[in-house]
Image: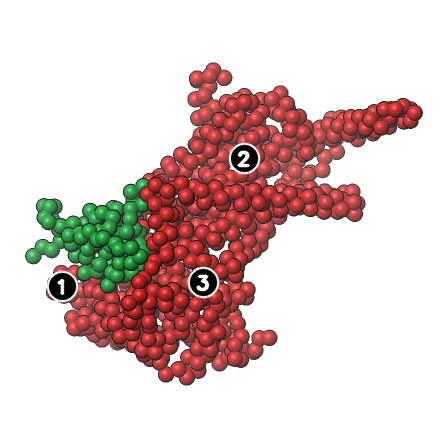
Chain colours: A green, B red
Amino acid sequence: MDDKKSSVKREFYTLSDYREGERGKIVDIKGKGKFLTRLLEMGFTKGEDVYVEKYAPLKDPIELIIKDYHVSLRREEAENIIMTKPEMVKKRKNEKEQSK
Amino acid sequence: MRKNNQNEKRIVVAIGGNPNSGKTTIFNHLTGSRQKVGNWGGVTVEKVEGTVEHKGYEITFVDLPGTYSLTAYSIEEIIARNFIVDEKPDVIIDIIDAGNLERNLYLAVQMIEMKGKFIFVLNMADMAKKQGLKIDGDKLATLLGGPVVFTIGNRGIGVDVILDKVVEVYEGKDKKVRHIHIPYGRDIEEGIKKIQSVIRRDKDLRKKYSTRWLSVKLLENDSEIIQKIKSKFNNPDEILKQVEESRYRIHRIYKDEAEVLIADQRYGFISGLLQETVSLKPVNRIDISQKIDMVLTNRILGIPILIFFIWLMFQVTFGLGAYPMDWIEDGVDFFSKIVAGILPEGILKSLIIDGIIGGVGSVIIFLPNIILLFLMISLFEDTGYMARAAFVMDRIMHTMGLHGKSFIPMIMGFGCNVPAIMATRTLENEKDRILTILVNPLMSCSARLVVYIMIAGTFFGKKAGNVIFSIYAIGIILAVIMGRFFRKTVLKGESEPFVMELPPYRIPTLKSVIIHMWDRSVVFLKKMGTVILIGSIIIWFLGNFPIYKSYSVDYNSQINKVNVEFSRKIEALSSQNPNYGEQKKTLEEEMRREIEKLEGKKKEEEIENSFIGRLGKAVEPFFRPLGFSWHEGVALITGFVAKEIVISTLGVLYGVGNNGEAQDLKKALLTKSHMTPLIAYAFLMFVLIYTPCLATVAAIKRETGSLKWTLFGIGYELSLAWILSFLIVNVGKLFIGG
């Protein structure tokens, strides 16, 4: 059983595919060592909710909301985070997303 | 008054916590000005300690580096955990951002695994309240195994409670203190048990470390712990084999590495904990920071706003800073004159006036600028805007091989490289820090501008502006090239993840900002001041010795002649003459200028025969291929103390004198030196790239903590400067023909 993604493109999304205002859950994280550990300690665990707040003026990095705080990630790093299908979220005025 | 080192009266407290949790502010409130700053064992990480007296105890607080976790992947984490595990502080405080509990507790959970007496400080309690969070501190304390203290760090609220708690915990009077086990689930627990039983056989390891903690770390494939086991354990292979087995087993069952599962379990534990202790009131959570960011990191406005803030920074620094700069300059002059009046003629006078006051004075006038730059850094950091600047600029910085957080330090380099290099502290990763420090001197500082203006103005006339602009531009381009080059060669390795927190905006307290600014300024004065002082004395010595007696012309008698001649002329003026005042003044002016010229020539000869002149002649072969004569060589060498000195040295060497008129120096350069515009351009290039001033070198040594990198920096800059100047002169000749 091979859980790691093969090069055949199946129906999966990476965090870098998400647009501003979209949200979804983490399915898997590719990578090892320092990169993986860093993401883990910042709260990127399987099943965790992630919301894309915005892209930087130069289109990179990305600002995300995870576990109720703001984190930024480079697109090349976001490519390693496998996500569920993105869901566009309409923000109501004066209400912050509760990502619990 | 220190008590005689009775150990019962001393308490050592470690303070840890996430970056941005307000840890430093609380530390500052606890220790105030009684702080001692150093470095952790020969690495580039700053160590701050402070001791206070409370309830008859002498409490020493040690500020651990801010970390999100305690893995082996960064030097900060290793330092933090080794302090806890090896030094065994009496009490350990974890500063937690109450508005960000879940992630902050990830660190707390790893700390309690290390065995110790803990106090959990929930800081920024006011922000949490605003978010509608209600936290049951008592329950949380029970579940975490240590008392909970609520604080509002930037208002100093709750800090006294911390002091009381420290004493209570130390005296064993707090009931909440107990050791908690994080449950990792059946399969991992089995792995832990098996590894533990092997470790337990070594009595020394058992006594020194928590065996459970070691086992968990080994299961997580922690490289530093593996190293420790290999070096300390009697039979490392046995234990490592067991670890290997357990890891393999877990991977087979869960299809994931053990460390991923362990992280999951930690968050699971935290989640359960939060469910029992935190309730969210149904309040509309208005996130002010988010609103502010809609403007500050806006797609269209983001960059212009950043440029504006940078502009503001320089305006404050150089605009506002100009006033104290003038005062200090006047002050130094005044002081110099007084001292000149008191001291008898001779070597000591020359040493003090020219060497010490002259050398140190030329750097001290930049002090206001430097302090203001430190103030700006403090403001950017404490408000949280620094992270936004990094966020906006990262893409550009990344192409330079740098990190978004390098942007502010790099830009500051255009003002002065010293605070810029000290500002690299904000970079969380050592490699990023070193790289930024290495290329920072290529950002042409304001002292160099003085040299550019003089040289470009002399040789390029109206085009001087464009020429200077091209120098700045080339500096930036070189920084990009060298940045990428070093990233691929000397500083290669696993590339650092960018993952960076964007903390909520905060209004910094005046006290906090002033303390930050003050700390850095004091360091600057102490370290750089000493270095500059010594450097000035050495340059003075090299320039004034050996004492020269046999001049080509008897200058002293010449000067006397001029004196006598003019005095006679002035006397001859009839006091009845209506233009008496004016004519007298004109004659006095002329006399002064003649004498200055003669003294200038006298000085020129002296320097030529001094050590520095000889040094200049000795290194002439080095400069010859670049078209520089020994004059330029000497000037460049003195530029090592401070770049502005290059101009005054050239002045002296070409007989114009230390404070000669700019016009005179221009004329002298055009006629006496053998520089053509092409060579002048090469000279500008050399000044741009070659070794930075003493203060900068001292800053590099201090921030990298390594002689190796400092020497490397000096070496590559000197080489690069030479190569480029050489290319300019020789390739340029082909096009221009000489």
Do we see residue B181 in this rendering? Answer: yes
Q: Earlier in the sequence, mark 3 or mark 2?
A: 3
Residue B636: x and y, percent? 56, 34
Tell me residue B42's x, y (percent): 44, 57
Q: Which residue is mark 2?
A: B449
Mark pair 1, 3: CA separation? 41 Å
Mark 3 residue crowding within 10 angstroms, few (<14) / some (14–19) / many (20+): many
In the displayed structure image, the side of residue B431 where residue A99 appears, left or right? left
Lateral position of residue B39 relative to residue B199, left or right: right
Q: Secondary structure at mark 1?
A: helix
What's the mark number on residue B24?
Answer: 3
Mark closest to the chain's N terminus, 1 or 3: 3
Looking at the picture, tell me which residue is in the foreground, B668 or B730.
B668
Above or below, B668 against B229 in this view is above
Residue closest to the far front = A93
Is residue B14 placed above or below B429 in the rendered structure?
A: below
What secondary structure is marked by label 3? helix
Instruction: For marks 1 and 3, give the one nearer the viewer.
Output: 3
